[in-house]
Each structure stands twice: as C-alpha cells, then as structure tokens.
Image (cartoon, grey):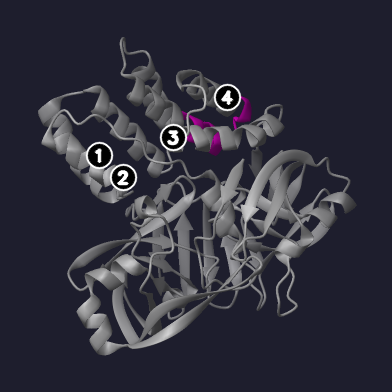
Amino acid sequence: MLLVTPTKPNRAPPAWTAAFLAAALIAPAIGVAAESPAVADLQLLFDQRDFFALRDSLPTVAASLQESAEIQFFRAATEQAFNRPAASNETLAVLLATPDLERELTLRVRHLQLTNHLRLHRYAAALESAGAIISELDEGDESPVGLDVRGKLPLLRALADVPPQVTDVRGPSRLALGNTRRIPLTIQGTKYSFTLDTGANFSVIRRSEAQKLGLEIRPANLVISTSTARKVVGDVTVAREVEIGKIRYSNVVFLVLPDELLSFPDGQQIQGLVGFPVVEAMGEVVFRRDNVLEIPYKPPRRAHQNLALNDLDPLVQIRYGKDSLLCRFDTGANQTVFYEPFFERYRERVESSGHPITAKAGGVGGIQEIPSYRLPKLALTLASAGVTLRRAEIYTVPIRSSDENYLYCNVGLDALERFRSYAINFRDMALVLR
C-alpha cells in the first residue's frame, strides 16, 4: 500500500498536489558496502542526493579505484540524475552481468533500473524489475526497499500492458497561460486548462473528468495520507491522445484523484495537472514574464548542467554566501521556503535578523502550521544570477523524515520574478535565467 505524505508546503493552491505524487514514487536509499573512504564519500553524497558533487567527484575516485562495481553503480545513478535513463540502464546491464554481485548491490541496481524504466515509460519492464527485487527479499521484509516496491506493485500491474508514451513535436509552440498560469491542452479532443507542475511524477486528472471522457479507470491503490490524517485512494488511466500546442502525445498516463482532492477551501478547483513525463518530452520550456509559455521545435544545446533529478523531483544548487546548498526547483510553488537544515546551519543569523512566525502551509484536507522565522530579505545566487527574496520564511522544524531531510529549500516562482524569462532544458538539465 502506497503511503504518500505532504512534502511541499507553502505552495500555490492549484499546485501542491504534486508533492504527494512525487513522494509516492521516490525510491529509498540503500547502502553500498564501502570498500574505501573514497567510496564511503560517494555513498554519502548519494544518500544526500547531492548529484552535483557526486558527478564532480566520481572521475577522480574512478581513476584511483578503476571500474569497481560500486563505481559503476554511482555512474549509473549520476546518469539517471542528469536525465540519461537509457545510458543508465546500459551501465546497470553490465553490472547485472557481473558474476557474484553482492545481494545488497543487486537490490540497488534493480531499484535504479525500475526508476529508469518508469522514466522511459516501459511499465512492463518496470514490473519485471520489481518482481526481481521482491524475489531477492525475505518473506515479510519491511525494509524501505521492500515497502517501496511492494507499494508500487498495484500501480505497475495497472500499467503493465500500456505502450510507452510517444511524443510528436510538429513545430514550435507559443501558449498563453493567463493569470492562472494554466496550460491549455486537449485530451482526446476535449479542451482543458491544467496546472503545469514538473514535480508531479505523472499527470493528474479529476475522477469526474476521466469519467466524462470515457477513460478506463484502472485500480492502482495509491493511498494518499492527508495533513488531517484522512486517507484517499488514487487510480490511473491512459489517454490515447493529448495535444499541447503543436505537440501530440499518445499513451499518456494520468493519476485519477477524487474531485475533492483537487478542490480548495477558498473555492478554487483544478481539473488536473500536467506532470513531468509530458513536460520533459517537450525538451525545453521557456516561461516568460507575460505568462506566455514557449516550446521550441528543437531544444537548443545548453552548456550548464545545473539541474538534476531525484527520481522525478528537480533539484538545483543555490549559493548562499560562499556555501552551495541543495534545493528543490518547484514550478508549482509561488513562494520559496527554507527548510530546517537551513535554519540549523544559519541559526544565529536567522534568529538575529528575523522574527518568529507560524507559517501556514496548504495541504490536502486542511492547513498545516509550522514554527518558522521570517527574514525581511534574503540574497542568494541561482543559476549564476543574483536573487533577493522578500519576506523569506525559514522553517525551524523538519517536515520530512530524518533520512530525507537533506534539502535546504524549495525554490519557487518568487525567485524568478525579476527575470524576463526562464528556460528549463531537460535534454541538458539546465536552468537558464534571462
């Protein structure tokens, strides 16, 4: 059973839902037996999801240790993080062919492979990887991997016969998003306006809309735990055709959520979300200050690889003073918030410059109150550009479990307001600010 918990507070009302979807599919870390201090250092970077430092450290360690199984694993993990799932799978295939591969490392390899298959829309192959993992586990195993994979099984079984998503880009697109920043699209000929959120593992549609379209709703048993301890179940469906601008998609997977889950106390409702698999297939998206979204016919090459993926959760490094900090890049959040690790690292500065508040974060089923500090302003560097945030909120308590509490902030749209445009390039994993 999949338990999903809120991980992205303080989001714009139409977009927080993706937090629950992202948390549902993030694979837990499994340790590699460290044969040397250098491998232990790489393991720490992997556990902290600092794929930027892992990428930069790997060549030096690999040169000294040659191509050990652990080095190959970290190479595959880095390829996955920088959106090269096919290359990652090729590296993992070599590893799986290695004689006498340790059981723990085999589980790690299979887990990466499962995520790659999902990224490539190869659902039957993902189910096969899940079966291989379960065959390696003891009966009743309640390890993070065991719980994670068993939780995914209903979803993978529901999608096992679904062909891969196919994307046909027929030309450049220019879409007016309007003040709501919702993206126009058609699903099997019916027009909609969905919120765009790169942090959602799949696109999302309200159950009532899926029923109106006559889509087959497949039970997936996605159990969503709300901020008020209420639980709801989500399923999946597949649209045979979706169009966005001059892009035509086939075999698009949607999570089907209860209508009330996409309704808000202030009366706002959304019909659905355009999630990562659809947006990533665009190659590059350019958001302009005048609420226009541009999608080039062919994404240009970008030199700076300054975005990474934790599963399908975009990560970015910011500079605060002389320090590099790992954050989530969240196109569904209006406001940037800083998490408890930031508070602990800069506690004296925060307490002397800010004042205590109770932050209110919108979530499923209600409002979550979080002890916090508010700073009148906070300067940082994002994608080589200076950014000054006004009324920055810093949480003083963790909002995630200890083994996931490695992010310093969630970068929202307020960090991008002063720029004429920003581009997200998924081919080169680059964020470009202008």
Determine the CA span between mark 3 and mark 2.
16 Å
The residue where tag 2 is placed is 47
Depth check, mark 3 against mark 4: the one in front is 3
Depth check, mark 1 against mark 4: the one in front is 1
- Choose top left, top right, bottom left or bottom right for residue 236: top right
**Which segment is the magenta one?**
113-125
The residue where tag 4 is placed is 125
Q: Secondary structure at mark 3?
A: loop
The residue drawn where x is 34% and y is 68% is 340
Determine the CA span between mark 2 and mark 1.
6 Å
**What amino acid is at disc 3?**
Ser
Q: Residues within 10 Å of mark 3 (few under 14, many from 20)?
A: few
Q: Is residue 28 magenta?
A: no
**Position of residue 258 measured from the top left corner of the image (x, y, whole percent):** 76, 56
The residue where tag 1 is placed is 43
Depth check, mark 4 against mark 2: the one in front is 2
Determine the CA span between mark 1 and mark 3.
19 Å
**What amino acid is at disc 2?**
Asp
Left or right of 155 in this view: 106: left
Left or right of 323 in this view: 250: right
The residue where tag 3 is placed is 143
* Mark 3 vs 4, N-terminal side: 4
Q: Is 45 in front, or is 272?
A: 45
**What amino acid is at disc 4?**
Ala
Q: Are marks 2 and 1 in contact (CB under 8 Å)?
A: yes
Q: Is residue 167 above or below residue 432?
A: above
Image label count: 4
Q: Is 69 in front, or is 301?
A: 69
The residue drawn where x is 30% and y is 11% is 100
Magenta span: helix, strand or loop, mainly? Answer: helix
